[in-house]
Amino acid sequence: MESHFIRPGDQSMDYGSPRLLEHSLNHMKDLLLWIGHDGRVLHANAAALKFYGYDSDSFTRLTIHDLDIHFRRESWPQHWEALKRNLTLTVTVQHCNAAGTFYPVEIVDNYQCIDGHEFSIAVVRPVEHRDDKARRMQLMEFSVDQMRDSALWISGDARVIFANDATCRNLGYTHDELVKMTVFDIEPSLKPETWPRDWERLRKRKTLTYETVHRKKDGRMMPAEVNANLVQVHEQEYNCAFVRDITERKINEAELTRLATHDVLTGLPNRNLLNDRIDHAISHAKRNKEYAGVMVVDLDKFKFINDNMGHDAGDELLKEVASRMKSILRASDTVARLGGDEFVIVLEGVAHPEDCALVGQKLMRIIAKPIVVREIAMEIGASVGIAVYPLDGEDAAALMKNADIAMYQVKSEGRGSFQFYEREMGERASKHLSIITGLQEALKNDRFILHYQPVFDLKSRQLVAAEALLRWQDPGRGLIPPNEFIPVAEESGLIGAMGAWVIEEACRQNSRWQKDGMNIVPVSVNLSAYQLRNAEIVDVVRKALTTCGLPSRFISLELTESMVMDNPQKVIGILKEIQGLGVMIAIDDFGTGYSSLSYLQRFPIDVIKIDRSFVKNISGDAKDAVIANAIIKLAHGLGYKVLAEGVETAVQSDYLQSQGCDLVQGFFYGRPVPAKEFERVLHRRAVA
């Protein structure tokens, strides 16, 4: 060893000579390490070099962290200060030799300072060199200190008797600090006044597992899972508690809870959390003798934007709307997303029911402002229904149902507004639901029938086509007219299945007439907007024709002007596919919508039908006559045939013929009748 580490006072050849001293140290069985204040290995005796498997030069290039890989570098300053303070520290750790083998060792570390040079002399004893009992104890202590979980021994008077290294790491205290503390310093939920009861519970149960929080040295709280065990040693009872840091688990649980209760796109509460928020608002209103409001918000025009600009643009719009709605609400209020473009606002602590209208007005204004998505300013609106506790319901389900009814009332009246629930709305909704249930039963039990209205050629006065019109034969109410159930079917989505049935039944009946030897004519079927939005309509038509064995020229499809303009590009594609099957296409109610002439010439259509509203006063109202004449000339100019519907008088018929109209239908030529009666028209062929 260099003389600046050990400076003997006498350099003569006596027992204190450095050479003789070094010789003695090298023949000791104990391993000796000289460690610098920065953790570097300065020197080692022969026993240490042999044990660790290094030569002297290689060994002195190591640090204590190379020997003890579990010793964190950031902990060294703390260890060194503790050594300086206590002068001697004894620890049991695991050291690694040059071959990579780990050995449990006991280290007695002794602080030294000579001529201002700070270092320590560490006496290292491998645990296996001790007697069996001591070795077992040493291994047990070593094993406890190597645990990732904290281990605490707590006495019956709540004092900390022992803490392993993991406890020090997790809580930030030293061993010396911990053994001077009580359990109350670590676990705030435990109180001195209730400790006897807590201890008695552990004595009875022997083991307890629970979750709590432990206070770290820096004041932060650590979520912890505690496994407390009653242990008796030499007639003394202790709580041997194993403590696991569950911070990460709690973070994951919180995230799972958030995902289960919040909408992924907007971050708003979802349906799962909404009922809880409504219940909370109701409880608050009960306690304070106030009101609570529930507002169902449905965005107008969102589907058009979503379909035409894509789902990403739709998502951006939804997030902006969610942000705007939150901005007008108080912290105590809630805005939730149910899905799609439907939101719900819960107003807590409402002093007067009319206050909900103020929120409704703010909502209308903030949503009506243009929303810029991908540098395109888009304008949408909202239809809002409001239900107030306790006036419109006393629980979440009733308030949601009635607010929803009010919202649909707004939509039916033109959208873009808000409305409070009224009892009459509930009665209408009940009737609405009754119709839906009845339609479902009708589909299952074959209670729909088709009536057929003839279409005649004005010049030849011959039967050239027929229109199939749906009727509902209800066992209790008899024959129900379409204006009572078609709107409900469209709103509920049942129109899809009903429309498919109409197409198939029209094909089946026409095919049956053909097989019976009758001279059949094309039968037209009305399509709904729902069917036209669904590309499967092409397959529905193809399947019906194939199944019934009917030539495609004997079926035609009618769709309204507003339907084709809803999404022109998509509609053109679907209509071309249908026309490719050989099926004729007619535009119904022409003149009532807002057709673009540039699109009209691109639509693959065969017939334009003049709406009955222009036919009704065609002989007495100059404006109606001008419009009808213009439609006829426009259609002929584009190569389409013209069919006037709603013809009820000879005067109307003669006028239309004088203007060059091709086809007519209406009560003057024949009312819609069941298939059996229409067979007589097929036989007659000409106008009666």
Image (spheres, grey):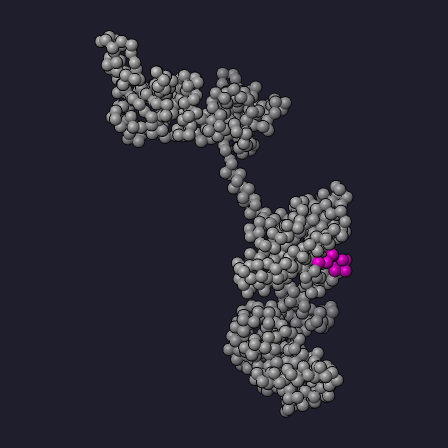
Q: Position of residue 286 (x, y in %)?
A: 75, 43
Residue closest to the far bottom: 460
Left or right: 133 as drawn, with respect to 424: left
Q: Is residue 673 visible?
A: no
Magenta range: 418-426
**Which quadrant holds the N terminus?**
top left
Rendered view: 678 above or below 143? below
Asked if the magenta segment contains residue 507, the reply would be no
Rendered view: 103 above or below 385? above
- Total numbered badges shown on the rendered structure: 0
Residue at figure coordinates x 56%, y 79% from the top left: 601
Quick one: 551 or 418, which is closer to the camera?
418
Residue at figure coordinates x 58%, y 74% from the top left: 504
Asked if the magenta segment contains residue 419, the reply would be yes
**Which quadrant holds the C terminus?**
bottom right
Residue at figure coordinates x 31%, y 28% from the top left: 62
Rendered view: 678 above or below 331? below
